[in-house]
Image (cartoon, rainbow, N blue to C red):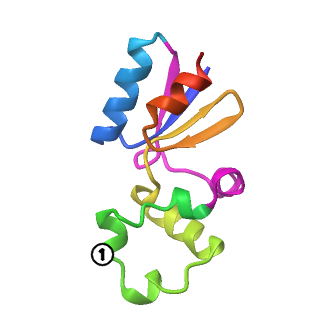
Amino acid sequence: MATIYGIKNCDTMKKTRNWLEARRVKADFHDYKASGINKPMLEAWSKQVGWEVLLNSAGISFKKLPDADKERLTEKKAIALMLALPSMIKRPVLDAKGKITVGFKPDDYKKLFA
C-alpha cells in the first residue's frame, strides 16, 4: 500500500493519482492542507530526501513570505515554515515500499512499482 501526500486540487496531484490508478496501484491520499502534517513526519522525510527537496521554494506561498523568513534557511526553519503553511511542501510526496519520492516522477514510479 502506498500513501500520497499533497493538496486535493493540485494539478500535479491529479497527474500522480491518474498514473497510479491507470496501473492499478492502490494508494491512500492525505491532504496535508486540510488534515495537516506533523513535525516527526516532516523530519523523517527530510532525513530521507533533504529539506531542500521538500520545500516548495518556487511556489506562491514561499514567494509571499517576508524576505527575513526566506533568508538563511536551515532544516529547522524550513520544517517550521512547512508546518505553519503546508502548501509549502512540494507535491506530491509518495510514500511507498519504505521509500519517499517527492514530485511527480513517472520513471521513478515505474521502478518502484515494477
Which corner quadrant of the image does residue 2 belong to? top right
Residue 102's x, y, as percent?
Answer: 52, 45
Which corner quadrant of the image does residue 101 belong to? top right
Above or below, comparing residue 7 to residue 57 in the picture: above
Disc 1 designates what residue?
A: 64
Q: What element carries label 1?
A: loop
Outermost residue on the bottom side: it is 68
- From this viewpoint, is residue 9 visible? no
Residue 61's x, y, as percent?
Answer: 33, 66
Residue 90's x, y, as percent?
Answer: 45, 53
- From this viewpoint, is residue 5 visible? yes
Above or below, comparing residue 74 to residue 48 in the picture: below
Magenta segment: 25-50
Q: Which of 23 and 10 is in front in this view?
A: 23
* Left or right of residue 14, residue 41 in this image: right
Which corner quadrant of the image does residue 60 belong to? bottom left
* Left or right of residue 47, residue 60 in this image: left
Question: Mark 1 is on which residue type?
Answer: Lys
Q: Examine the structure image and report whether residue 17 is included in the region drawn in magenta.
A: no
At a point 39% along the width and 56% down the height, the residue shown is 87
